[in-house]
Amino acid sequence: MLLILINLLAYTRKQPRIFAYSSAALAIVRPEAALWFLLAVLFSWQRFKLKSFKQLVAFWLVPVGLLLVYHLWLFAYFGSPFPHAAIVKSQIYTKRAVPYAAFVELVRHLAVGVCGLSSFEQIYSISNNILILFPLGILILVLALRLKTFPAFRLYALSMFLVFLFYALPNSWIFNWYLLWFALLPPLLTVYLASLLSTHRLKWLRVLAPLLLGYVILAQISTYPSLSKVSLSKVSLSKVSLSKVYVPCPFFLYQAEWGRFAIYRQIGRKIKELAAPGDLAAVTEPGLVGFYYGGPILDLGGLVSDNVVSCYPPKARQESPDLLYAPPVSALTKFRPRFLCFQDGLVTRDFLNSAELKEHYRLVSFYPLPIYRATGLYLYQRSSQ
């Protein structure tokens, strides 16, 4: 959201270099933002009054070069320039009575978000406190863009339409965080409507403009959490106790899920210590373990590489919570990894109770971390080949 706001601000204030590099940064952070990047290139022609195709190429040469280097590195390291396997899994193994039915939720989120009729947790969070986007703070930032003529709205709206069409619809159930792309739409629409009312020829409609903004701001303030309702152990503040102070808290809360990153670093180093050259390590979340291990890595969750996708049954399965992350047991017998690392919330009971795991693997380390309704992270080593 911060990158989007910086990008729209640069577009509105006609800051071409900030606009170009923030567009590239968006495309690096999220692969679907490549659609945003393409639109940014097209919109820059008119907005920054580029007079020739040569100027356009010169303007975007370095940002495009950065993107190419980044995706070539992904291809060389992971075998794919995009994390495409999860999309394949969503389309092949998810069976719905009505295609894309889950995405109807987006309409409801936008409707209640514009009116301020629902608490921010229900609109702007993936689940309990995983990621919260505060409507009032976003509204103030959007107002700072001077969007009375709304030059940035067309760019944002068209980009969201493309994300909706090519990414959010096909992945509505399996990737619910695609909803976050649309989080700016309620405040943007509110400001847009207020700007239209403020310039209307009818006086009573002009009066409605500040009333509309005031209502939305008050509605969102009323739904803010107070520090008395927030566990201070999860908040990065000073040691001064603020537990009884009732104030809005527009900052991100620390999440227990983040603790797994430090554990993955330990696991990667542990595997490096135990492994022989060429030993394969299978990990449900391969990034940090692969970096600190430095040897061959099997993406057990199928998020970056499609190797594990081939182990799923050919027939479409019923929709289930384990669809995205849970690896099939057959992946162990097919690839026979020397090391196996997973969080027990990201695997199925069948996987944990499988004969392959019990007979051929021994537990090396267990790292307690009660997240995802589970107990922690496990590191196994294959005892026989």
Image: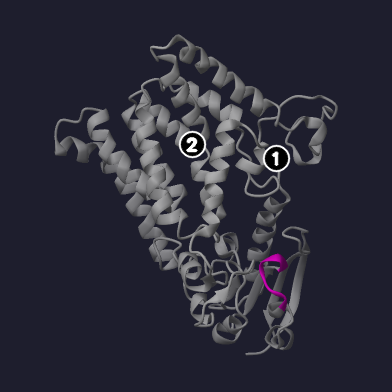
Name the amino acid type tagged 1. Leu
Q: Quadrant of residue 242?
A: top right
Which span is picked out in magenta?
A: 344-349
Q: Is residue 236 left or right of residue 30?
A: right
> Is 275 colored magenta in this rendering?
no
Asked if 139 appears above or below 66 in the picture, the reply is above
Q: Residue at x 52, y 70 (%)?
A: 302
- Which secondary structure is most common in the magenta stretch? helix
Is residue 112 something one can see in this rendering? yes
Q: Residue at x 49, y 60 (%)?
A: 100
Q: Residue at x 66, y 30 (%)?
A: 250
State the image coordinates of residue 235 (x, y, percent, origin top left).
Answer: 74, 37
Name the amino acid type tagged 2. Leu
Q: Earlier in the sequence, mark 2 or mark 1?
A: 2
Is residue 296 something one can see in this rendering? no
Depth check, front residue: 77 or 375 = 375
Position of the C terminus by quadrant: bottom right
Which residue is labeled 2 in the image? 185
Asked if 190 appears above or below 210 in the picture, the reply is below
Which residue is labeled 1 in the image? 253
Q: Is residue 132 left or right of residue 28?
A: right
> Is 345 colored magenta in this rendering?
yes
Q: Is residue 211 left or right of residue 205?
A: right
State the image coordinates of residue 232 (x, y, percent, origin top left).
Answer: 80, 37
State the image coordinates of residue 274 (x, y, percent, origin top left).
Answer: 66, 74
State the image coordinates of residue 102 (x, y, percent, origin top left).
Answer: 55, 57
Depth check, front residue: 363 or 99 = 99
